Amino acid sequence: MEKLKLVDKLREKTNISYEEAKVALENSNWNILDALLYLEENGRVEKPSVSIFYTNEVRYSEKIEESWKNEENKYETNNSFQGIFESICKYIDTGNNIFLEIKKEDRILFNIPLTVVVILSFFMFWIIIPLIVVGLFFDIKFYVYSKRVNTDKANKVLSDISEGVEIVKEKLKKVNKNG
């Protein structure tokens, strides 16, 4: 009786005759998967275009979709954590694609991703900020550039700061000449 069910199942899946299904199962020691492979090798059943193997009989149906949605709802707090993690990764990726270019005259001294600048500023604030201020007094210019993000406003702010430092330097020179 068991063998009859296997034959019917194989016929149902492959649309072949009862005789062909029985021969295929006999040649494969009554293993339905091996029988399918046997039929594919003999050209009786078309091979799948992609090598996908299913572990159950139900292949993508509405019932599975609903069960997946229910599983997702169970772990909704986990998804919110995943959303936060993805957002952080996007910000890091964006920061890695924005560069701070440090120039003196028309020579590039450093080209550093913004993520590195932020991390260095966070851990070495007392060193980085004074170095930037001193660098401005030694005619070092800072530029921000990126292929993905418009950096015109940031560069405008940095050029305004450089101009302000130039004005302060000119005033200090006049004070030293007069003093």
Image: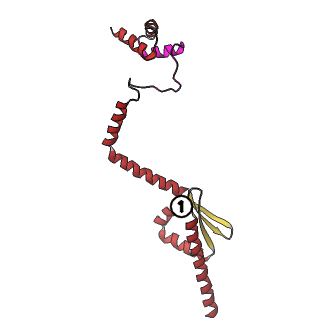
> Could you tell me how many numbered marks the image carries?
1
Quadrant housing residue 97? bottom right
Residue bearing the label numbered 1: 114
Using the image as rendered, state which of residue 134 and residue 39 is in the foreground.
Answer: 39
Rendered position, 45 above or below 131: above
In the picture, which quadrant includes the C terminus? bottom right
Whether residue 31 appears in this view of the structure is no
**Which residue is farthest left?**
74
Query: Residue 33, position in %: x, y?
Result: 44, 17
**Which residue is farthest bottom?**
179
- Amino acid residing under circle 1: Leu
The residue lying at 52 percent from left, 69 percent from top is 128
Instruction: For label 1, count other residues whose C-alpha is less than 10 Å away and answer few (under 14), some (14-19) or many (20+).
Output: many
Query: Residue 173, position in %: x, y?
Result: 63, 86
Q: How is the image coloured?
A: secondary structure
Q: What is the secondary structure assignment of the residue under circle 1? A: helix
Q: In the rendered structure, does residue 64 fall within the stretch colored magenta? A: no
Quadrant housing residue 135? bottom right
Query: Residue 67, position in %: x, y?
Result: 33, 34
Using the image as rendered, state which of residue 166 and residue 176 is in the foreground.
Answer: 166
In the picture, which quadrant includes the N terminus? top left
Whether residue 1 appears in this view of the structure is yes
Query: Residue 163, position in %: x, y?
Result: 60, 77
**Which residue is farthest top?**
19
The residue lying at 51 percent from left, 71 percent from top is 129
Quadrant housing residue 177? bottom right
**Which residue is farthest right?**
106
Magenta residue span: 30-53
Q: In the rendered structure, does residue 49 fall within the stretch colored magenta? A: yes
Rendered position, 152 above or below 63: below
